[in-house]
Image: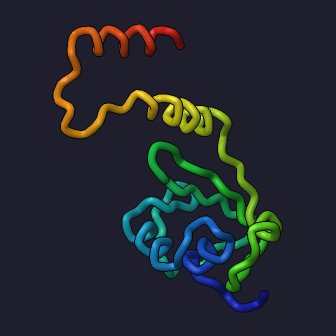
């Protein structure tokens, strides 16, 4: 594709965001960076750029393989983007998912002494 494509459109096209509006908002909030610099939604990515997208609790890293302005199917997305997120970041996500089983219900009050000890014991197992 010869014509330049905005980064928000590219992020949407390779399925990193569900809607283009979400991609635009994330760029405006400074959660999308290229080479450590926050980018505006109008920035034009180039093949070889490393794009970092911060989605709590981790920062995903992607390498631009090719440029497209049209949304591609999930099976074809790997032709345009390469996920280079370090394994340490993915481990944080895995730990976070395991910890979600110990979330307290909203409004259930402060944890009791026994609850706190159980949580401490669980966290010391790692």
Quarter of the image holding residue 3?
Answer: bottom right
Question: Which residue is depicted at the point 49% across and 34% down?
Answer: 96
Q: Nearer the viewer, residue 39 or 9?
A: 9
Above or below: residue 106 compared with residue 35: above
The N terminus lies in quadrant = bottom right
Q: Nearer the viewer, residue 106 or 29?
A: 106
Q: Where residue 98 sits: x, y (%)? A: 52, 30
Colour setup of the view: rainbow
Q: Is residue 58 left or right of residue 107?
A: right
Q: Where residue 111 sits: x, y (%)? A: 22, 21
Q: Is residue 69 left or right of residue 57?
A: right
Above or below: residue 9 compared with residue 78: below
Q: Where residue 7 sits: x, y (%)? A: 58, 75
Q: Is residue 16 left or right of residue 66?
A: left
Quarter of the image holding residue 12?
Answer: bottom right
Q: Nearer the viewer, residue 98 or 6?
A: 98
Q: Where residue 31 sits: x, y (%)? A: 45, 59
Question: Which residue is depicted at the point 60% across and 71% down?
Answer: 11
């Amino acid at each position: 594709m010869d014509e330049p494509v905005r980064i928000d459109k590219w992020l949407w096209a390779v399925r990193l965001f569900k809607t283009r509006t979400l991609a635009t908002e994330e760029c405006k909030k400074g959660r999308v960076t290229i080479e450590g610099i926050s980018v505006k939604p109008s920035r034009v990515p180039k093949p070889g750029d490393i794009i970092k997208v911060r989605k709590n609790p981790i920062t995903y890293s992607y390498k631009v393989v090719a440029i497209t302005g049209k949304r591609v199917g999930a099976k074809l997305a790997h032709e345009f983007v390469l996920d280079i997120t370090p394994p340490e970041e993915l481990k944080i996500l895995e730990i976070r998912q395991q910890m979600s089983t110990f979330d307290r219900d909203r409004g259930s009050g402060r944890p009791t002494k026994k609850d706190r000890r159980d949580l401490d014991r669980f966290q010391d197992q790692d």
